[in-house]
């Protein structure tokens, strides 16, 4: 491997002939607006997953069963109602004037109307107040009252009473039921303590809505981001460190060790990445109660280290024969000192660049694996797992896919731009040896 | 050249052996085995099944058996789909993946080269900017999201038209190939167009380009014979990894678009711990990818005579 380009002359030697004349850059590439923006983006994402859960203290696995796949909602209070059995109006209010609503909440709506002469049976319709038409026929009754307990939600309804025989419309009224929940259900969801007799329960706001199981999307995005970014940073950190040590040893030892090590690297590189990622991920297994992050990281470590090993080996080989290394060796500097003081500073920029490009790669891999259900296991979640949940409701609630996808894309984009900038900066300034 | 090919083929064979070995031992390190199911099994039945699949033999014997059968091109019988041979599964479903993959590679290649060339020709003008923004978007959005969005767009389009312009998912007709193939090739297309733009820019400012223009070559002839042929080389080098990325990326696209390709079977087999199917498909995919890389290496030498010269000298 001949090293033709040698741009390692220290600055004090003046402009050596072989130093490429680079026009001075008016703006250092690290400070371009794009880079600043993506650095800010990374910072925001990190804050989002670390500080976010402190500010937004909702559990990502709490299910709000009354709000399945809801859009953005604000906080509201819910009345706890216990009496939910059969109902009939008390005798003294037997003849109300017009259609009277006794109580209207989302557990039940109680209707009462005067007996009309000549009508044997009444038919009750319930419809959406904003839509034309009578809506759903709820019941037919000979009494002059009715209790509606069928899947009420917080909309405006219009009740219409009609003569069952002639179909003649008699009375109509619009009503908006107040939010309510039966005591039993509130206890079931853990909103009130067992045997408690609270009258109101607060339902918190969901600024980004809820998912298909009624869980707060904002809280889930924060929890998922923690997994995604953790894997995205820790896995590259591990495998690049390992690759660097491996490559450095190969490069420094040289000879048959180097040959053998590099053959091994060749084989590992040849393994089809995603295939083996899935295979190893299964092979390392997930015990009950584990979240599956560790197997994921180990699988990435096993498969991804060869890239940086090759890179560092090449650098070390190139550096080893550099005059300044030979000079220090002749001057009697010890091997460890040469490695630490002369070689490491020269390969460090490359390691950093490799690291910054490995992060988006790792985030992508994690997302892909979690998406096909081979990543983290529930209840732990990640952006990829959220996308997997979201794609099932894609056609009706696209937000549940788009929000985690947006965060994945943003972080990948930001890290890519940072990596690009870092590469340009190290390329121009420190003049890493090109082998 | 011949010794170069022989050398590449030999290392390819060793690589395939390595893949097979790694798969085998990774597979057997998995806790549990395919015979463990919800339904309890009497020890006698279990012993018989184990004997049938060779699971009762020592691990090393199993390994030898597996390698021997693999050399004969026989990957055994599936565990979960009874009496279905792995070879049949591959034979039946790989062509579907292959058609999808070929379409995707073609789209990525043609699209990437065209977009990259246009961007280089219009450097720093709006077509260039447009291409670069699209490239950044396509690189940073995961493939499964693009697939989902594509389905959303198709549904919206079909609704707007009031009839089925394009099927949302499934397999069987020509119109069902293009959308998944485009989705599959999009990331690669973006990557290739970035490379193409850089190398085309280099070619456009090269001396031989100026010389060709001075000779009076112009139009398509200039583009195809003088510029494209030189600029396309870095793209060809990327072809091997590209095909690898597209074949494995196919898993997700096959899942989302409900395409009965081999990738879907692989994911399914891994979830069900179907030893034979996993080993069969992994070795098959691995061998396929190794072969592609070798072919690309060889074709690189054919396209660029300079490479052959260098190789001959060193």
Image: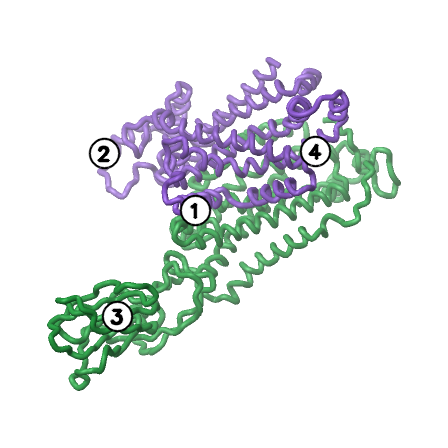
Chain colours: A green, B purple
Residue A15 % position (x, y): 87, 39
| Residue depicted at x 33% and y 75% | A79
Residue farthest bottom in this picture: A92
Residue B18 % position (x, y): 50, 27
Labels 2, 1: front one? 1
Check disc 1 and report the residue beneath it: B152
- Give the CA separation, mark 2 to mark 1: 49 Å
Q: Nearer the viewer, residue A10 or B248?
A: B248
Check disc 4 and report the residue beneath it: B201
Task: Classify 10 Å Cα crowding around label 4: few (below 14), some (14-19), many (20 and above).
Answer: some
Q: Nearer the viewer, residue A355 or B174?
A: B174
Task: Classify 10 Å Cα crowding around label 1: few (below 14), some (14-19), many (20 and above).
Answer: some
Instruction: Mark 2 vs mark 1: tell me if same chain.
Output: yes
Labels 4, 3: front one? 3
Chain letter of disc 2? Answer: B
Task: Classify 10 Å Cα crowding around label 3: few (below 14), some (14-19), many (20 and above).
Answer: many
Labels 1, 3: front one? 3
Check disc 3 and report the residue beneath it: A159
Q: Is residue A74 visible?
A: yes
| Residue depicted at x 70% and y 35% | A315
Chain letter of disc 4? Answer: B
- Give the CA separation, mark 1 to mark 4: 37 Å
| Residue depicted at x 79% and y 48% | A26
């Amino acid at each position: 491997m001949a090293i033709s380009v040698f741009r390692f002359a220290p600055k004090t030697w003046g402009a050596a002939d072989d130093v490429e004349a680079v026009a001075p850059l008016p703006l250092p590439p690290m400070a371009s607006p794009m880079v600043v923006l993506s650095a800010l983006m990374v910072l925001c994402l990190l804050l989002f997953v670390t500080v976010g859960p402190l500010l937004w203290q909702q559990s990502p696995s709490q299910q709000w069963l009354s709000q399945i796949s809801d859009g953005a909602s604000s906080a509201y209070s819910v009345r706890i109602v216990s009496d939910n059995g059969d109902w009939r109006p008390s005798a003294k209010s037997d003849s109300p004037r017009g259609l009277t609503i006794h109580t209207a909440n989302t557990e039940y709506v109680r209707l009462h109307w005067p007996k009309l002469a000549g009508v044997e049976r009444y038919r009750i319709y319930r419809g959406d107040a904003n839509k034309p038409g009578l809506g759903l026929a709820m019941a037919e009754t000979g009494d002059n009252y009715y209790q509606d307990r069928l899947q009420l939600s917080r909309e405006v309804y219009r009740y219409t009473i009609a003569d069952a025989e002639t179909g003649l419309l008699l009375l109509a009224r619009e009503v908006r039921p107040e939010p309510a929940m039966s005591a039993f259900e509130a206890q079931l969801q853990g909103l009130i303590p067992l045997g408690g007799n609270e009258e109101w329960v607060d339902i918190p706001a969901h600024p980004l809505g809820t998912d298909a199981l009624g869980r707060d999307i904002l809280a889930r995005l924060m929890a998922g981001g923690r997994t995604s970014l953790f894997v995205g940073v820790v896995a590259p950190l591990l495998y690049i460190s390992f690759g660097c040590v491996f490559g450095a040893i190969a490069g420094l030892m040289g000879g048959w060790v180097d040959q053998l090590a590099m053959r091994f690297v060749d084989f590992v590189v040849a393994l089809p990445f995603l295939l083996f990622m899935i295979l190893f991920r299964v092979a390392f297994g997930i015990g009950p109660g584990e979240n599956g992050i560790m197997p994921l990281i180990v699988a990435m470590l096993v498969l991804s280290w060869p890239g940086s090993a090759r890179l560092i080996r090449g650098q070390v080989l190139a550096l080893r024969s550099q005059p300044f290394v030979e000079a220090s060796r002749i001057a009697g500097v010890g091997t460890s000192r040469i490695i630490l003081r002369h070689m490491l500073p020269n390969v460090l920029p490359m390691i950093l660049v490799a690291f910054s490009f490995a992060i988006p790669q790792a985030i992508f891999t994690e997302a892909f694996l979690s998406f096909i259900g081979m990543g983290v296991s529930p209840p732990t979640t990640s952006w990829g797992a959220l996308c997997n949940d979201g794609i099932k409701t894609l056609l009706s609630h696209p937000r549940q896919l788009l929000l985690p996808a947006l965060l994945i894309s943003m972080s990948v984009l930001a890290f890519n731009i940072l990596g690009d900038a870092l590469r340009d900066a190290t390329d121009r300034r420190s003049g890493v040896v090109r082998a | 050249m011949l010794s170069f090919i022989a050398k590449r083929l030999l290392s390819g064979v060793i690589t395939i052996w390595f893949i097979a070995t790694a798969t085998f031992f990774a597979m057997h390190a998995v806790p549990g085995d395919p015979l463990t199911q919800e339904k309890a099994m009497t020890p006698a039945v279990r012993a018989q099944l184990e004997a049938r699949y060779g699971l009762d033999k020592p691990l090393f014997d199993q390994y030898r058996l597996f390698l021997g059968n693999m050399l004969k091109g026989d990957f055994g019988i599936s565990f979960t789909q009874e009496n279905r041979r792995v070879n049949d599964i591959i034979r039946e479903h790989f062509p579907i993946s292959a058609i999808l993959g070929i379409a995707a590679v073609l789209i990525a290649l043609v699209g990437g080269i065209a977009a990259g060339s246009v961007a280089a020709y219009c450097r720093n003008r709006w077509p260039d900017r447009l291409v670069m923004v699209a490239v950044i978007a396509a690189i940073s959005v995961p493939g499964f999201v693009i697939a989902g969005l594509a389905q959303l767009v198709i549904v919206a389009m079909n609704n707007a038209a009031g009839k089925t312009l394009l099927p949302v998912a499934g397999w069987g007709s020509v119109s069902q190939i293009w959308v998944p193939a485009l989705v599959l090739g999009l990331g690669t297309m973006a990557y290739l167009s970035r490379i193409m733009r850089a190398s085309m820019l280099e070619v456009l400012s090269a001396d031989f380009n100026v010389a060709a223009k001075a000779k009076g070559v112009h139009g398509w002839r200039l583009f195809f014979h003088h510029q494209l042929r030189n600029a396309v080389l870095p793209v060809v080098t990327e072809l091997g990894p590209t095909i690898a990325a597209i074949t494995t990326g196919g898993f997700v696209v096959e899942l989302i678009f409900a395409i009965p390709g081999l990738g879907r079977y692989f994911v399914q087999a891994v979830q069900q711990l179907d030893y034979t199917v996993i080993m069969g498909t992994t070795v098959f995919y691995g061998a396929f990818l190794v072969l592609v890389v070798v072919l690309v290496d060889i074709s690189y030498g054919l396209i660029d005579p300079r490479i052959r010269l260098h190789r001959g000298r060193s």
